[in-house]
Image: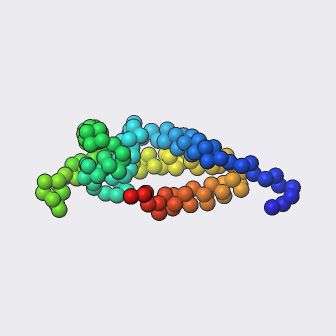
């Protein structure tokens, strides 16, 4: 390190989580297409990324109760953002999938969030921008690779 460059202040895990929470809240609030709640947007995004899903699996993945997920899917269905289809592998089962409209709304919301994040990053210094562009994908990889304890 260059002696003329001051050392970065020590950042506690609590400081980091507060920063992440603020950033996530800011970016989430920037997505307005479709007027969706955070939960509805998360479900639509998951269906867009992962494809059709059983309602019970969707509830589990989103940390919601099955009755709450049923209500949310019903609202999304009424808005023509998702549809229920028969599970071909199990005739008794039902899958929830995003409609073309739902996929487009999800794409637009992702673009709005990306734009908001890009504007935030543009306000940083060059070294800070580089640090964010390295750190965020690294954290995403760590999350993807993380295996919760059984």
Splitting the image into 4 quarters, where does residue 39 fall? Answer: top left
Q: Is residue 115 left or right of residue 108?
A: right
Q: Is residue 40 left or right of residue 24?
A: left
Q: Is residue 104 visible?
A: no
Front one among 76 and 89: 89
Q: Is residue 107 left or right of residue 101?
A: right
Position of residue 91 measured from the top left corner of the image (x, y, whole percent): 12, 57
**Which residue appears at 27% of the width and 54% of the height?**
53
**Which residue appears at 42% of the width and 57% of the height?**
149
Position of residue 52 measured from the top left corner of the image (x, y, whole percent): 28, 55
Q: Residue lying farthest front?
A: 150
| Quadrant into which the N terminus falls | bottom right
Above or below 6: residue 64:
above
| Quadrant into which the C terminus falls | bottom left
Position of residue 93 measured from the top left corner of the image (x, y, whole percent): 17, 53
Q: Is residue 147 left or right of residue 70?
A: right
Splitting the image into 4 quarters, where does residue 21 fall? Answer: top right
Position of residue 85 measured from the top left corner of the image (x, y, whole percent): 19, 52
Q: Is residue 31 visible?
A: yes
**Which residue appears at 49% of the width and 45% of the height?**
112
Q: Residue lying farthest left?
A: 91
């Amino acid at each position: 390190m260059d002696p003329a460059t001051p050392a970065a202040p020590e950042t506690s895990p609590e400081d980091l989580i507060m920063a992440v929470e603020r950033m996530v809240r800011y970016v989430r609030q920037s997505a307005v297409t479709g007027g969706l709640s955070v939960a509805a947007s998360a479900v639509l995004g998951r269906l867009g990324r992962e494809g059709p899903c059983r309602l019970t699996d969707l509830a589990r993945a989103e940390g919601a109760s099955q009755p709450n997920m049923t209500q949310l899917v019903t609202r999304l269905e009424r808005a023509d953002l998702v549809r229920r289809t028969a599970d071909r592998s199990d005739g008794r089962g039902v899958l929830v999938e995003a409609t073309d409209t739902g996929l487009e709304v999800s794409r637009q919301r992702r673009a709005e969030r990306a734009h908001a994040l890009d504007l935030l990053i543009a306000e940083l210094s060059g070294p800070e921008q580089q640090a964010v562009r390295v750190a965020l994908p690294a954290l995403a990889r760590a999350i993807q690779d993380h295996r919760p304890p059984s």
